[in-house]
Amino acid sequence: MTHNLLFAGVGGQGVVLASEVLARVAASEGFDVKQGEVHGAAQRGGAVVSHIRFGERVYSPLNLRGRVDLLVAFEQLEAVRWAHYLKPGGVLIINDHRIEPTYLNAAIKYPANPAEFLASKSFRVVELNATRSARELGNERVSSLVMLGAASKFIPLKDESWQQVLGERIPAKLLDINRRAFAAGRNAIA
């Protein structure tokens, strides 16, 4: 069985870090892993999306539309933008956080309630405020690890593997807060 995941957000939200950690965890458990990223004008707040696929044998890093098992949206509008990749009944984790795109003008409005809209489309929607959780931990930048922790509850990989890779990938001075952020995400789903 191949697991198909998609992480989507805006430049600076930690999409690439979260997807890299996931890919390393899957590889550490012996899975064949493919990861592909698309960076828009990421450093200027543009869209960033990362495709992650793992299983016994995986041939392509890119997910097909309508086949993604789990979409992790680090920002509400990115959930709407990438939802067509989810399979019917797929899980969508949305960070209840808005970043107004710079290209929206007064005539175009940000969607009123993206989570409600997407829940009406036969997806299993899980909404959490990872940004607020990260602020409560003392650093908004760890919201990506809150999101990853929440996602880990839907990914069949061992907790020991997650902890091992976090220890290898995160700098020592930031490891404690990132581990607490990961745990906060897991606990939000529990």
Image (cartoon, rainbow, N blue to C red):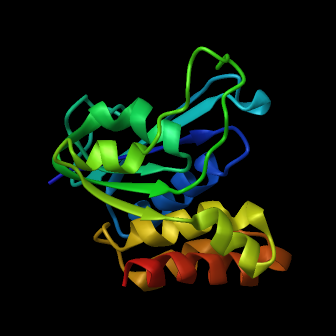
Residue located at (56% from left, 65% from top): 129
> How many numbered marks have been drawn onto this rendered protein structure?
0
- Hey, which quadrant is residue 143 in on the image? bottom right
Residue 40 in the image: above or below residue 76: above
Of the 4 image quadrants, the one containing the C terminus is bottom left
Residue located at (72% from left, 69% from top): 170
Image location (x, y in percent) of residue 98? 62, 45
Image location (x, y in percent) of residue 75? 56, 46
Q: Foreground: 164 or 98?
A: 98
Of the 4 image quadrants, the one containing the N terminus is bottom left
Residue 102 in the image: above or below residue 18: above
Q: Foreground: 84 or 105?
A: 105
Residue located at (49% from left, 37% from top): 78
Residue located at (56% from left, 18% from top): 108
Image location (x, y in percent) of residue 88? 14, 44
Q: Foreground: 91 or 56?
A: 91
Q: Residue furthest right?
A: 173
On the question of residue 50 being in view, the answer is no
Question: Going by the image, does 166 lie left or right of 51?
Answer: right
On the question of residue 81 being in view, the answer is yes
- Hey, which quadrant is residue 125 in on the image? bottom left
Question: Going by the image, does 122 lie left or right of 68?
Answer: left
Q: Foreground: 48 or 55?
A: 48
Image location (x, y in percent) of residue 135? 75, 71
